[in-house]
Amino acid sequence: MAGKNVIVFPTDFSEASLAALPWARRMAGQMQAEIHCVYVVEEPHIYATLDMGPVPIPSVEELSRSAEKRMAAFASAHLKEAGIVTRVLVGRPAEEVVRYAREKNAGLIIMTTHGYSGVKHVLLGSTTEAVLRHATCPVLSIRNA
């Protein structure tokens, strides 16, 4: 199923991300939509310093395999109803969520925001904010207190 009958529900497998799930379920019922639960594996960044020795960095393939297992466990625990599609993507989270929603011609993206401000926001950035800025469909942002 593609088109306006798709709701994209990004997760990072945290309890905080679960705050958006009841909203996704409710909206899916009203829109007769399929929920696509997506997780994005971020490619590892290598930061070097002069005194740093070899640091083992997992490959994207290893991270993806691990994420697939986590997604299966997450789906088993929280996404038991039929009609929920799960996907693990690789890249920058905001970019991949926006790209996936565009590819599926999604009618809605529903996700949580942590509500960071000040230094924490600058250091951690905001995936939700970037999705809000770049998505071509409506985005429902649920604040997680």
Image: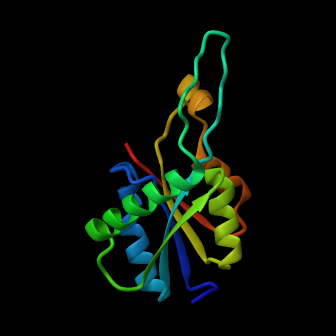
Q: Is residue 119 above or below residue 115?
A: above
Q: Residue furthest left?
A: 77
Kindly identify the residue that appears in the image at 31 percent across and 63 percent down: 73
Q: Residue furthest front?
A: 54
Observer-nearest of 62 and 82 = 62
Observer-nearest of 89 and 46 = 46
Kindly identify the residue that appears in the image at 33 percent across and 72 percent down: 79
Q: Is residue 104 left or right of residue 41?
A: right
Kindly identify the residue that appears in the image at 49 percent across and 85 percent down: 33
Q: Position of residue 27 (x, y in %)?
A: 45, 77
Q: Is residue 134 above or below residue 2?
A: above
Q: Position of residue 19 (x, y in %)?
A: 36, 57
Q: Quadrant of the C terminus?
A: top left
Observer-nearest of 78 and 117 = 78
Q: Position of residue 123 (x, y in %)?
A: 59, 28
Q: How many marks?
A: 0
Kindly identify the residue that appears in the image at 67 percent across and 21 percent down: 48
The colour scheme used here is rainbow
User: Hey, which quadrant is residue 30 in on the image?
Assistant: bottom left
Q: Is residue 13 left or right of residue 121?
A: left
Q: Quadrant of the N terminus?
A: bottom right
Observer-nearest of 43 and 13 = 43
Q: Is residue 103 above or below residue 41?
A: below
